[in-house]
Amino acid sequence: MNSSRAVLFCLLLLSLGVVMALWTNRSDKRNVVPTDRREVVFWHFWGGEDRQIVEAVVDRFNASQEDHFVRAIAMPGNNLDMKLFMAVTGGDPPDVVNQDDPIMADWAERGALLPFDEIASPAEIESLQKWLVPASNRLGTYRGRLYALCNGMDIRALYYNKTILDQHGLQPPNSIAELDEIATATTEIKPNGRVERFGYLPDARRLWAWGVVFGGNFYDDKTREVTLASKPIQNALDWMVSYRDRHGAAQVAAFRQGDQSLPGKAFPLLAGRYTAVMDGQWRVRDIAASQAEQRRAGEAVTDYGVCPLPHPPAGRSRAGWVNGNFFLVPRGVKNREGAWEFMKFWTGFDGNEANAAQTCVAGGWIPVSTAVANHPTFLNYLQQEPLFATFSELAAAPDQVPTPVIPGAAYFQRTVNDAAATAMYVEDAPSVTTLLEEAASRIQAHVDRSASRGQP
């Protein structure tokens, strides 16, 4: 099969997937649009239990409305961006899309997205930007204009096994030195030299967080320069590599591979593989479920805690890497007004804070505005899940930084991860400086091409 036929075949398969999704959703009576309402076609990637939460939000919106009616179409799995591309080029895009991949700037550069100043009034946009926390603003802004509205953030913090820390007389770490102390004191090594449990082990994929914590920035928006090889990020990766030097690249890589072999998406902290792990707010539910199971089994309940990422003396406190889910409005939609009303309803903007608080509690999602985070419904949830409070507080901090919102962001992210993985898992890897400089050069060339061509 030649390349053009292969592309055509893939497009036909994707088209069939879109048609099947549309047919499945049209057959659901809840998606029958009343004759006196304007339809809002909503594509999203949610599946499983989360899909039920999304559908509940849609039902509440539809019950609150007299003008618009959202018809939700689940598009779980890969290639949501390709399906959107096909719909846009075919002249029949959905009115609003929920996405979680760093593709917004690529689509904005192509001219395939409506900036929100073409949907809402200048006064509304100004009010929205003040209402959102800084991280949410960053996730939705490209070249000074809002092209996306964040509806949930993913924040990273440091989970720790408090029971183990107490056994060793240690406190939750505030500094990198204290984290290193925990790593040294609580790592368990078998007589044959193999590590049974790491006190802490940096994850190559988390250079994005540690680079910010160490005081670095990966990209300069003003000069459009990739600054991956800056000294603070080199220092962060050097610190991460010190764990490889201590335990050996082969053992570090094998231990990480062992994490992937845990059943399902089990949290390695709960499996006893670490004393401390960087991870996101979604693990709060895993911990609560594990502790509940220990109580049912009559076992001693392991105590866990969470704290902001420790930082070096010259670094940033309460800092890290953020990503999230966001709404996009493709150019050429039929009902931009309805899309805007639905986005406001979900996120809580323009007087919808009570509904957004209910949504965040149902999904275990971080609000995108302090107005929602401070709503009594959400505050009551934090009393029940105190570990979650740290993530909600960190979300409003100014130094929670996303992957650069630029064309080619996905390539940027992959290339940084690959460089860090080489540094962490290859015994005779090039120096940190060499790896980061070479990666920065490749990323800069890719970003420049993407911006000039308007393509990812």
Image: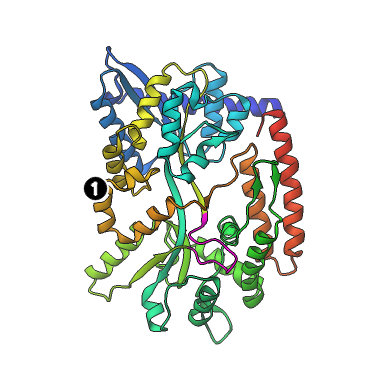
Q: Residue at x 45, y 36 (%)?
A: 129
Camera sees residue 21: no
Task: Give coordinates of residue 339: x percent, y percent.
Answer: 40, 24
Position of residue 19 relative to residue 368, above or below, is above
Q: Main secondary structure of the magenta part?
A: loop
Task: Give coordinates of residue 268: x percent, y percent.
Answer: 45, 65
**Residue nearest the viewer, comparing 115 with 223:** 223
**Identity of the amino acid at label 1?**
Pro
Q: Label 1: which residue?
A: 376
- Provide the secondary structure element on which disc 1 rests: helix
Name the outermost residue toward the bottom: 191
Task: Give coordinates of residue 363: x percent, y percent.
Answer: 33, 46
Colour scheme in use: rainbow
Label 1 neighbourhood size at 10 Å, few (<14), some (14-19), many (20+)? few
Q: Quadrant of the N terminus?
A: top right
- Does the stretch in magenta take in 311? yes
Task: Give coordinates of residue 50: x percent, y percent.
Answer: 35, 43
Position of residue 83 relative to residue 326, above or below, is above
Q: Quadrant of the C terminus?
A: top right
Camera sees residue 256: yes
Give the quadrant of residue 109. Answer: top right
- Does the stretch in magenta take in 260? no
Name the outermost residue toward the top: 35
Position of residue 284 relative to residue 452, above or below, is below
Position of residue 323 relative to residue 3, above or below, is below
Q: Residue at x 76, y 64 (%)?
A: 430
Q: Which residues are magenta?
A: 309-320
**Residue nearest the viewer, comparing 391 with 6:** 391
Give the quadrant of residue 39. Answer: top left
Q: Residue at x 54, y 47 (%)?
A: 402
